[in-house]
Image (tube, helix red, strand yellow):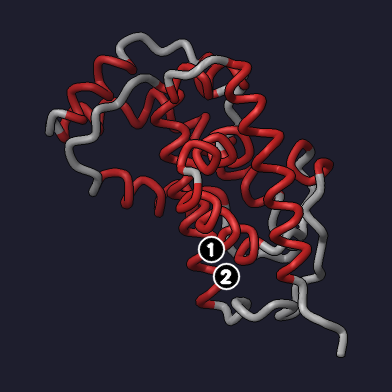
Amino acid sequence: MSPAQIPPPNATRLLQAWGQGDQAAFEELIPLVYDELRRLAQRELRRERSGHSLQATALVNEAYLRLIDLNRIEWQNRAHFFAMAARMMRRILVDWARARGNQKRGGGIPKVSLDEALLVSHDPGSDLVALDEALETLGAMDPRKGQVVEMRFFGGLTVEETAAALHVSADTVMRDWRSAKAWLLRELSRSEPDDA
């Protein structure tokens, strides 16, 4: 089940109340979305190298702490919330990788080129720090394409859910998705270290 298909009643109302500053609404929302947040965290961790010491529960808890600090966001719907949660988890994993000394290319993590199979499947072992840097560059050049990648790849949203969250057509999302994947492939290929 995708994040936007979660059936809890009142989730959108709670998100909107939280966005208007009602912290009690956030506390009421978390039990409604916790299981999906945990599944999202498990999927993110499966993309990491084997032996990763961060557990899904710890990732959800850290994302919770960062989410609760967000103020005055105009939440559109559950898909928007899960896209933001995915962004928080990505930031946590990148921060963790950098803290562990993996910011250097090839810092003990096997290189996996980012191709369409990586973006569509959930193969572990990608260089998260390099991907994050490329996504930051893409987001600076074309914010919507960066958001499409975050929502689809990190948030697990469908094309339709992404389109609704971004207020664009599904065709626009697919064009952005294809263009962003091609750009990321070129960017990551260029950033690979020379063997010299």
Q: Position of residue 25 (x, y in %)?
A: 20, 27
Please indicate whether residue 74 sits to the left or right of residue 169 in the image: left
Task: Name the residue rendered at 77%, 53% in the picture.
Answer: 114
Task: Name the residue rendered at 53%, 58% in the picture.
Answer: 137
Foreground residue among 148 and 39: 148
Q: Is residue 128 above or below residue 181?
A: below
Dot 1: within a 10 Å radius of its alpha carbon, few (fewer than 14), some, or many (20 or more) residues? many
- The amino acid type, in three-letter code, at marker 1 is Val
Q: Position of residue 172 (x, y in %)?
A: 58, 22
Outermost residue toward the left?
21
Outermost residue toward the bottom?
196
Q: Quadrant of the C terminus?
A: bottom right
Outermost residue toward the front?
141
Q: Quadrant of the N terminus?
A: top right
Q: Position of residue 153 (x, y in %)?
A: 63, 39
Mark 2, secondary structure of its residue: helix
Task: Name the residue rendered at 69%, 49% in the picture.
Answer: 183
Disc on res. 97: 2
Please indicate whether residue 22 sits to the left or right of residue 47 in the image: left
Mark 1, secondary structure of its residue: helix
- The amino acid type, in three-letter code, at marker 2 is Ala
Q: Is residue 30 above or below residue 180?
A: above
Residue topped by disc 1: 94
**How far apart are labels 2 and 1 at the CA level?**
5 Å
* Contact (Cβ within 8 Å) of mark 2 with mark 1: yes
The image quarter containing residue 102 is: bottom right
Task: Name the residue rendered at 65%, 33% in the picture.
Answer: 177
Foreground residue among 144 and 157: 144
Please indicate whether residue 11 sits to the left or right of residue 113 in the image: left
Dot 2: within a 10 Å radius of its alpha carbon, few (fewer than 14), some, or many (20 or more) residues? some
